[in-house]
Amino acid sequence: MILNTFEYLMMNNPVRAMLQRRYEARKLLRMGGPMRGGRALEVGCGRGVGVEVILDCFGADAVDAFDLDPRMVAKAGRRLKRRGDRARLWVGDAARIDAADATYDAVFDFGIIHHVPEWRAALAEIFRVLKPGGRFYAEEVLRAYILHPIWRRLLDHPLEDRFDHAQFQAGLTQAGFVVTAARPFAKSFAWYIADKAAAPDAERA
């Protein structure tokens, strides 16, 4: 879904960027560790802060990223211009990712999947585009927050078939992931590290 005016303002301000860098990213880094170079994908790039975080904090060599909202992709393009070919952007849909199978060493979700009506399809797509041995870093907003009367009035989220902590973990498992770490907070937010198993030949190497 494309953000409404209120949520657009929530996502495009220095406070949000600070939280993403100093709290959310650091929590995922503690849970899942850094990348060892390689190419990453960010699902729902917003104005490009997450791409910077993945490059600077997680150690990716390059990041591909997309967003459903062309305004966000344009903002991200301006922000990331100095990164050159280390950042590649496009307008896209998390339920139908425009990438070949086994393309990425890691995929990042900074609070995007709860916006996707077909969230299970998005998890399946993320699994598909990850290389064997790849890692999914996810921060998510849970059903209790989305369905709270105040936030239902202010924010535009899909309301049907929303997930709680256990359901999101089950969705990851159903998609094929092995969940290696999960941290819920106040029934409203959660962080996950989930891996795609390495190919058998790689495990024997």
Image: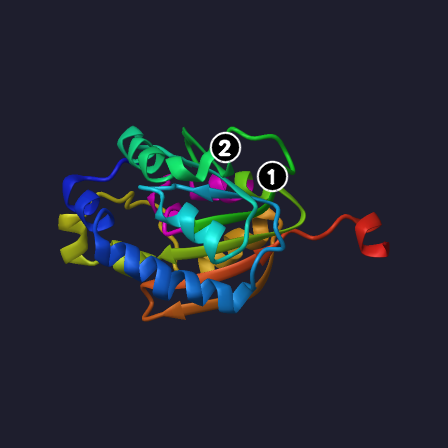
- The residue sitting at 42% across, 46% down in the picture is 51
- The residue sitting at 32% across, 71% down in the picture is 186
Quarter occupied by the N terminus: top left
- The residue sitting at 39% across, 41% down in the picture is 44
Q: Of helix, strand and loop, which one carries label 1?
A: helix
- Residue 12 seen from this side: yes
The kind of residue on which mark 2 rests is: Ile
Foreground of the two, 162 or 63: 63
Q: Position of residue 197 (x, y in %)?
A: 69, 53
The part of the image, by quadrant, that contains residue 141 is bottom left
* Residue that label 1 marks: 128
Marks 1 and 2, Cα distance to the nearest angstrom?
9 Å
Foreground of the two, 153 or 17: 17
Indicate left or right for 78 with 203 as reference: left
* Residue that label 2 marks: 97
Magenta stretch encompasses residue 12? no
Going from N to C along the chain, the mark reached first, 1 or 2, is 2
Q: Position of residue 57 (x, y in %)?
A: 47, 58
Graded by Cα atoms within 10 Å as few (under 14), some (14 to 19) or many (20 or more), the crowding at tag 2 reads: some
The kind of residue on which mark 1 rests is: Arg
Q: Are marks 1 and 2 in contact (CB under 8 Å)?
A: yes
Secondary structure mostly seen in magenta is helix
Q: Is residue 164 above or below residue 183?
A: above
Magenta highlight range: 110-124
